[in-house]
Image (tube, helix red, strand yellow):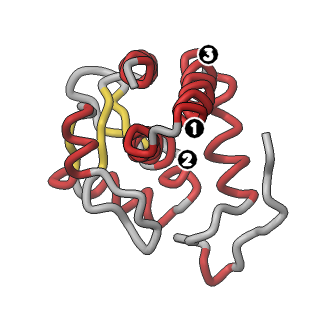
Amino acid sequence: MPCTMYIRPHTKYNFTEDPDCVHEMLGHIPHLFIPSWSRLYRAFGRTARRLAERGDDGAMERLILMYFAVVEKGLVRTGPGDAVKAIGASVISGAGELRYAVAHPERHLPLEAEAVMKYGSTDEDGFMDRYFVGESVEGMADFVISWVDQL
């Protein structure tokens, strides 16, 4: 997995627009040790290759939206009625966004493809307007793998 050599300055501890090694090491590398999320990363890669070979720009945009909503900005519950926790790499690696995302349940939507396509964003200029919440780590991965296989 490629990893940047950039590291955020102390003035950007809470949020940085650019992925840095803190983001890669705290956010993405741990996902690879969760079997369902390792499969999820492979599914995104396979699907991106297939869509690129097909030249399907519309489906690629939808794939990117889903990737961003889940892998970068996703939240998850560990049990029914439990508080949300960060699973998305950008949320985990940014202390300011982590606090913001967890403290604003009015911005949480259930992880559903239609909601991600309608409210999802890849904007990196600040915190998200909406965060998508899965009911379990494995359930999120299974849902998204099934969804990407249909693109």
Foreground: disc 3 or disc 1: 1
* Distance between the alpha carbons at the discs numbered 2 and 1: 24 Å
Residue at left offset 26%, top offset 62%: 129
- Check disc 1: other Cα within 10 Å, few if <14, some if 14-19, many if 20+: few
Q: Specify the amino acid type for callout 1.
A: Ala
Where is residue 57 drawn, in percent x and y?
45, 45
Q: Which residue is mark 3?
A: 35
The residue that label 2 is drawn on is 89
What residue sits 58% from the left and 55% below the top?
93
Q: Residues within 10 Å of mark 3 (few under 14, many from 20)?
A: few
Measured Cα–Cα span from mark 3 to mark 1: 26 Å
| Horizontal arrangement in the rendering, residue 62 relative to residue 14 (left or right) | left
| CB atoms of marks 2 and 1 within 8 Å | no
Q: Give the x, y percent position of residue 33.
A: 68, 24
Q: Which residue is outermost to the bottom?
A: 11
Q: Residue furthest left?
A: 106
Residue at position x 62%, y 31% in the image: 49
For residue 17, above or below residue 87:
below
Residue 39: x and y in percent read 59, 18
Q: Nearer the viewer, residue 24 or 58?
A: 58
What numbered label is drawn on residue 52? Answer: 1
Q: Of label 2 and label 1, which has the lower sequence position?
A: 1
Residue 139 seen: no
Q: Earlier in the sequence, mark 3 or mark 1?
A: 3
First in sequence: mark 2 vs mark 3:
3
Give the secondary structure at mark 2.
helix
Q: Is residue 144 left or right of residue 24?
A: left
**Direction right: furthest residue:** 5
| Vertical position of residue 127 compared to residue 76: above or below | below
Q: Amino acid at mark 3?
A: Pro
